[in-house]
Image (cartoon, rainbow, N blue to C red):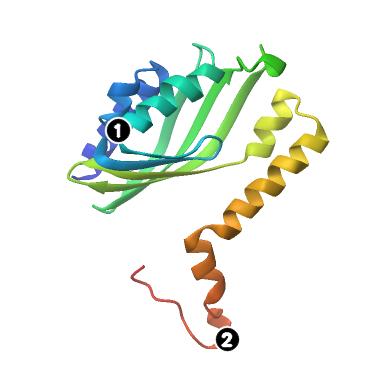
Amino acid sequence: MNTEDFRRLLTEFTLAAEAADGERFARCFTEDGIYYDYIYGAHRGRKEIAYMLEQLFRRDADDDYRWEMFDPVFDGKMGYAWSLSSFTSLVPQFKGKFVVIDGMSRFLVRDGLFSEYRESVNGGVAMQQLGVEPERMAKILKRWGGWLRERPETVDYLARPRALDGKMPSQDR
């Protein structure tokens, strides 16, 4: 896969998401692929990925959902892209509220398909647009902070010494 192939797969990925076509969306992933969503958690395998899109995310986002990737970079194994997405909420207590979100996405690629997707999104901005009460926002952000600290890569990162302390971390991670 080259950068142009990566761009085409990103386009297929976002168009499938916009169309709420879980099967098409999941076909962008390897059979054992994993999608880490900042709201709905980790989903492994095409069946779970399709379920996440159709039954969780698109349950909560109206048909005006849009998702576009910008400035993709790809090194043959890993790619990144900045994105904008927007939708009108269908969640009962936030129904009708319009949200626009920016984020960064990381894709691991194997055999021409995504084997892993991770996103970094400012969920606080999304919650503010929805009108989430400050107390609830604080509770959610505390939970997200806990998840971040518990992730194996975060635990590994925190266990390593700082470069300023005389030891450089491995560059081949």
In the foreground, 144 or 129: 144
Give the farthest residue toward the bottom: 166
Q: In the figure, 69 relative to 105: above or below?
A: above
Q: In the figure, 50 relative to 109: above or below?
A: above
Q: Is residue 31 left or right of residue 164?
A: left
Quarter in which the N terminus is drawn: top left
Q: Secondary structure at mark 1?
A: helix
Give me the residue at 75% from left, 37% from top.
137
Name the residue type under label 2: Asp
Earlier-in-chain disc, 1 versus 2: 1
In the foreground, 30 or 79: 30
Quarter in which the C terminus is drawn: bottom left
Give me the residue at 58% from left, 54% from top.
148
Counting from the top left corner in percent of width and height, residue 14 is at 38, 27
Category of crowding for the residue at label 2, using alpha-carbon neighbours closer than 10 angstroms: few (below 14), some (14–19), many (at least 20): few
Category of crowding for the residue at label 1, using alpha-carbon neighbours closer than 10 angstroms: few (below 14), some (14–19), many (at least 20): many
Give me the residue at 68% from left, 35% from top.
125
Q: In the figure, 19 relative to 155: above or below?
A: above
Q: Quadrant of residue 46?
A: top left
Q: Which residue is mark 2?
A: 165
The answer to the question of whether label 1 and label 2 lie on touching residues, with beta carbons closer than 8 A, is no
What is the number of the mark on residue 46?
A: 1
Give the spatial CA distance, label 1 vs label 2: 44 Å
Q: Secondary structure at mark 2?
A: helix
Q: Is residue 154 left or right of residue 9?
A: right
Viewer-nearest of discs 1 and 2: 1
